[in-house]
Amino acid sequence: VKNIPVLSGYPEWLPEQRIVEQRILDTIRRKFELSGFTSIETRSVERLDVLLQKGQTNREVYVLRRLHAGEEEENKNLGLVYDLTVPFSRYVGQFRGQLTFPFKRYQMQKVWRGERPQEGRYREFCQADADVVAEGALPLSFDMEMGALLHDVLSSLPIPPVRILINNRKVLDGACRALDVEDVPRVLRNLDKLDKLGEGAVRRMLLDDAGLRESQTGTLLELARIRTPDASFADRVRALGLAHPLLDAGIAELTRVMDSLAATGSVTADLHIARGFDYYTGTVYEGVMTGHEAAGAVCAGGRYDDLIGSGFVTLPGVGISIGVSRILGRLFAQNALTADRRCPTCVLVALAAEAARHDVEAVARALRTRGISTEVHHEPGKYDRQIRYAERKGIPYVWFTDGNQVRDIRSGVQAAADPATWMPPEEDLVPQVRRGR
Amino acid sequence: VKNIPVLSGYPEWLPEQRIVEQRILDTIRRKFELSGFTSIETRSVERLDVLLQKGQTNREVYVLRRLHAGEEEENKNLGLVYDLTVPFSRYVGQFRGQLTFPFKRYQMQKVWRGERPQEGRYREFCQADADVVAEGALPLSFDMEMGALLHDVLSSLPIPPVRILINNRKVLDGACRALDVEDVPRVLRNLDKLDKLGEGAVRRMLLDDAGLRESQTGTLLELARIRTPDASFADRVRALGLAHPLLDAGIAELTRVMDSLAATGSVTADLHIARGFDYYTGTVYEGVMTGHEAAGAVCAGGRYDDLIGSGFVTLPGVGISIGVSRILGRLFAQNALTADRRCPTCVLVALAAEAARHDVEAVARALRTRGISTEVHHEPGKYDRQIRYAERKGIPYVWFTDGNQVRDIRSGVQAAADPATWMPPEEDLVPQVRRGR
């Protein structure tokens, strides 16, 4: 490739950044599995009618065609997935008879959106999702469990604290109905932009775009401004004097969720949160990194009672999604997260001469057998050059087979060692992830 | 989704199968990292001119377009990657100044090919690749190292033994030149199909399709029939009486590689192997599972001296690729590989009544803190029902908080236990992968 094409919106990490990403994915996986969530992977493509159901027609979907597709070939209309919830719901419908419910699963995969690339918005990115889906009723205790899991996972990552904002669609929906608002989805989308566009802009959108009256707009903005660290939001909503059974149901659910999670100190009931996907029907979550609010939501999720259906039955679900690429893109751009090596290697075995290769390979094998990542220098030559190779890659130790000496090349300290027993300090065994600034 | 679309060629695994896949990917990753290979991920899309370079025009590439692409939008001509070597070579060219050479990396990602789906041929599948690329010369010792790594990785997986077939393009190429063959790539492609189509069919292809003379065809088929477990192939090639410097170079290289790997007992010098990709220039590898030869190659690789270029320099590389999806698809179809659970959960904590939830959650937390995957039953109810839920998911233990008793539900043995100290036997801590038949 003489002329290398750079494509914006398709992030790729350097090896030392990928080590950070691996550590984060490993930690998320570990936490999900400790809570009994099982891994699945869904295919990257779905039929367009699946992708565009539930009014997702405004999504920027990538459509596929085969390069050598013949004229006669049936147009299958396949597109790349833009989230993991829609393919998951199709998977549950398809394999329902072979799954055990409530089905708790996680997925860590790429998704694609043909949006205009900008900071924090990618065309290909990695999400880590966990969801639970039930046959019949899905107890509200799962809304609490998913919120607690989100807090547990995020607080175990080497990233700034994440504040989790929680709302319930029934609160917004019920308030709209109490106010006789007609186009509820449009109003919810407008309110959801309060943080991004500010109150003046949202007020104008509600009046001009959604066609609300001044009084409706005023009440909805008052509702959307409510933010409390506990269940005290409920009194402030009731003070607005709105009456609708759906509103009451939403207040009751959100109260129970906030009562259960307030002790974490990481959650806020924030009544403007609606989330962009139309499939949410109850609890909604969203998270922002402290000090990085401009990066937007780094996690999100919610309850969807009507997304998954097969025949006459629908399966309710609730889930969370962590925007791994968005978190990393932000922190990498600010040099706020790095690894102390650009490879997994702990020991480089120096190769003095081609004749020594047999001994050198034996040392490498002995170290690897005991879990120590080891490279053999690729060609014989001066030790100085081989040590410089280790330095450039961040490899902490160089092993010399003549006399079995191992040198910590950071300190220069060298000592005799036996390849059958020597172990590095634990912090040198694998690369360490470090938070900057 | 009322009418669930089934797409052939896009394999998806059930949870208990995904656990097997995870174990296999974890093992491959562990082996790659122990040898100092570092992880990268490349984007799933490349420009078509990158995908179709080096004569790869016969590949079935999926082309992307945005659903809402405007008329005025520049056609970027992006396609999904069909292997990991081409995007890797683009990555190395693009980030060359930020990498340390020889650059040893691995990737475990999805690739896409728009081929007709059939057993073992998928349209979306997972590959695990390891490659090393040098600036300047890449010593032949890496061809041996990659062969040894391939053997090491494959023999550590819970799959049937894999026989690794090795050849060198220079042997085939040099023999063709010694015989004054004109369209060498076509002849190599024909010879590569010897196992699949048989000698009669290949003979006809060489005569009719490639236009060879009877004597050329006879000599090439004699060459292609040579299979030896060591470097003794060389004498048999020399007995054919062909003379060309490239042939001599190929024999010398393959001799050194076979001398280095013969002791594994897993390799065969097999002179018909050419591999389909035109970018290979030296050593080529291919592997088949014993007893599953009909499944075709489950791993492959080789040396490519001219694929990666930037300006006037080309960077030589050598790599291996393991067809994870093809291996799993074959073994799953024959029920030859399973996990003993369909979730990671080791302990289900029973929930007698809603009032007990606080105690139950405390036990779950204590167990998780010590690395034991734990679920809380989602709703209070009869213990019998809760035990049946555990049975269906393969969870081995149920914990009762009244009196802190833990029951092995396979044996029915129940005993008092402390959530702060109790540990299951090691084989119960995580799901076990079992080989059938």
Image (cartoon, coloured by chain):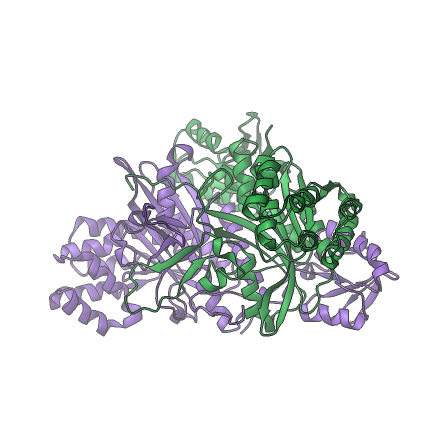
Chain colours: A green, B purple
- Residue A81 in percent (x, y) is at 48, 56
Is residue B372 visible in the rendered image? The answer is no
Q: Residue at x 41, y 28 (%)?
A: A385
**Which sits in the foreground, B212 or A334?**
A334
- Image height of B305 relative to A309, above or below: above
**Which sits in the foreground, B194 or B219?**
B194
Q: Residue furthest top?
A: A412
Q: How many labels were placed on the picture?
A: 0
In the shown orientation, is residue B192 left or right of residue A160? left
**Dividing the picture into quarters, in which one does residue B434 lie?**
bottom right
**Dividing the picture into quarters, in which one does residue A245 lie?**
bottom right
**Which sits in the foreground, A21 or A402?**
A21
**Which sits in the foreground, B229 or A248?**
A248
Quadrant location, the N terminus of chain B: bottom right
- Residue B24 in percent (x, y) is at 53, 58
Is residue A183 visible in the rendered image? The answer is yes
- Residue A88 in percent (x, y) is at 56, 61
